[in-house]
Amino acid sequence: MTDTNDNGLSRPMPDENPMSEGGLRAPAHYGPLRKLWWWFDFIILVKLARLRFIGILVAIGLVIVFWDTLFAYYDKCTRSAGKEQVASSDHEWFCPMHPSVIRDNSKDKCPICFMPLSKRKKGQATDEALPPGIVNRVQLSPYRVVLAGIQTWTVEYVPLTKKITTVGSVEFDERLQKQVAARVKGRIDTLFVNQTGEMVRAGDVLASIYSPDLVVAVQSLLNAHNNRNEVSLRLNREKLQLLDIDDNQMDEILRTGKANTHLKIRSPIDGHVLKKYVKEGQYVDEGMPLYDVADLSTVWIQAQIYEEDLAFLPPQERFHKKTPDKKGGLPITATTRAYPNERFDGTLTFVYPHVDQDSRTVTVRFELDNPGHKLYPGTSATVELDVLPKQLSILAKTPSAQLEKGRVLAVPESAVIDTGSQQIVYREASPGEYEGVKVALGPRMVGPEGVPFFPVLSGLESGNRVVTAGSFLVDAETRLNPAAGSIYFGGSGLNKPGQSSSVRPSTPDDEEAKVKANIARLTTEADRRAATAQHFCAIRQDTRLGAMGTPFKVMLKGQPVFLC
């Protein structure tokens, strides 16, 4: 709305609506109460609503950031001075389960197991001597067990084999190689096998030789037969046998009465011709080689074994007998690049009695059947030896019944921590409590499904549960590796007195399982039954017996009483 002044100019009229007023001031014609309402509506209800929410969020953030400080001031203001317990200069509070946790305030709890702290004099020794073979001990809260991904495995007798893998080359069986030589002087008239590599059968004619000496010998045989001179006949037959003339041929000569002027050279074995030394028409002397023939029904594989694996091979005496012990040889399996999906079975038949100084290996020989002649001499082959537990002298203390089945008390490879000077396996003493056990282990072997295992020589028993996943993190918690412990577990035990941990459990502790495990650690069955019947601790009536560790037995008036 507008109004006209004395000069005829128009001017705006005041709007009755207060919300139309511009700027940060109330309308001039408002009274005091109405101006107060205008400012309240402007600041709180309308104009600055967003600033109000921002202020609320800032206030909430400050409370969250300074919550510990505010809680400490509140606790200080509300704490009763008469009931406050503050450690004197001679006392301190510690966790009985984790003596490394020390506090100056009795109201704190152990950041690991969240148990109330106990009072002791400063400098008082509370660490118990660890049993023989136990290098350390640690207890973890359920939250940390879940955080570390700890998994356990029960130690038991497992079927194992020691696998040794090597690479060798296929060779001819030297015992099945023959050389065919001329028995008499003469001229080679015909070569029935005239090329290298040709397959022959035993008795096949290889060549024909004309020999004047053979003619004289056959004529002498006929003369002795015609004169009925038995002595001369016998001597001439023996002479022809030495010339490789068999009885059938001699009988044929005597029946027909004709002298054989050609000597037929026959193959002594089934096989193929490795080498041909002569040509047709060539004159040969007695003893001159004609052919080399090899039988491929059986082949050898020559391979090298490192000297570290010699202890797993049979003793040398087995290979130096006049009659080799083939049945007692180690079974082996070979594969070749030509037939990668086909496995050839054989045995270890010989170990050379010396080590090569350059390669630090010893040569071994395997004998294999060659069905279909698929194993070509000269090709390479990968060989796997399976050494059974009963063949290892280091496992002699294993019960014979288990050894005959090929079973050995063993732990998975993932459970073993090798520090260089000792081998440690973490055993679960009770739920959440782990002991580092020093063990003596045998050679690395292979179990079911190819899982690597180590035979246990000492340190563990059948039925023990060992950590297989997360063992390195448990080892870090024992402060063998403090840096890893601080990364994965918050560095428990390294806090300063008065400084509490912020770790909170996300998984409830299985008290029933802990009680059963701790009672099971008692030495006799009678003690275990008595502890189970007692149910509660004799000192702390509200605490289950076994919830704070293995119960301690005392005798009162001839009756056993267990303390927590």
Image: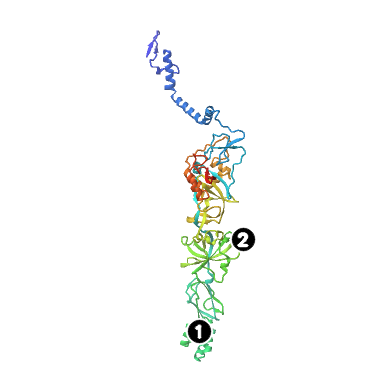
Residue most extreme to the top? 6
What count of labels does the image hold? 2
Which type of secondary structure does the marked residue at label 2 adopt?
Answer: loop
* In front of the other: 442 or 370: 442
Q: Position of residue 125 (x, y in %)?
A: 61, 41
Q: Mark 1 = which residue?
A: 261
Closer to viewer: mark 2 or mark 1: 2
Amino acid found under the numbered disc labelled 2 = Asp
Q: Is residue 513 visible?
A: no
Image quadrant containing the N terminus = top left
**Residue 94 location, quadrant:** top right
Q: Name the residue at the front extreme.
A: 557
Please tell me which residue is depicted at 53% across the width and 84% down the height of the picture.
Answer: 238
Q: Secondary structure at mark 1?
A: loop
Q: CA distance from mark 2 to mark 1?
A: 58 Å
Vertical comparison of 277 with 88: above or below: below
Q: Amino acid at mark 1?
A: Thr
Q: Residue furthest left?
A: 1
Q: Residue at x 53, y 88 (%)?
A: 232
- Residue 131 appears at what percent x and percent y? 58, 48
From the viewer's perspective, is residue 195 above or below residue 97?
A: below
Residue lying furthest bottom = 227
Among the two numbered marks 2 and 1 on one chain, the one whose residue lies closer to the N terminus? 1
Neighbour tally class for label 1: few under 14, some 14-19, many 20 plus, Cα within 10 Å: some
Do we see residue 218 in this rendering?
A: yes
Q: Residues within 10 Å of mark 2 (few under 14, many from 20)?
A: few
Residue holding disc 2: 358
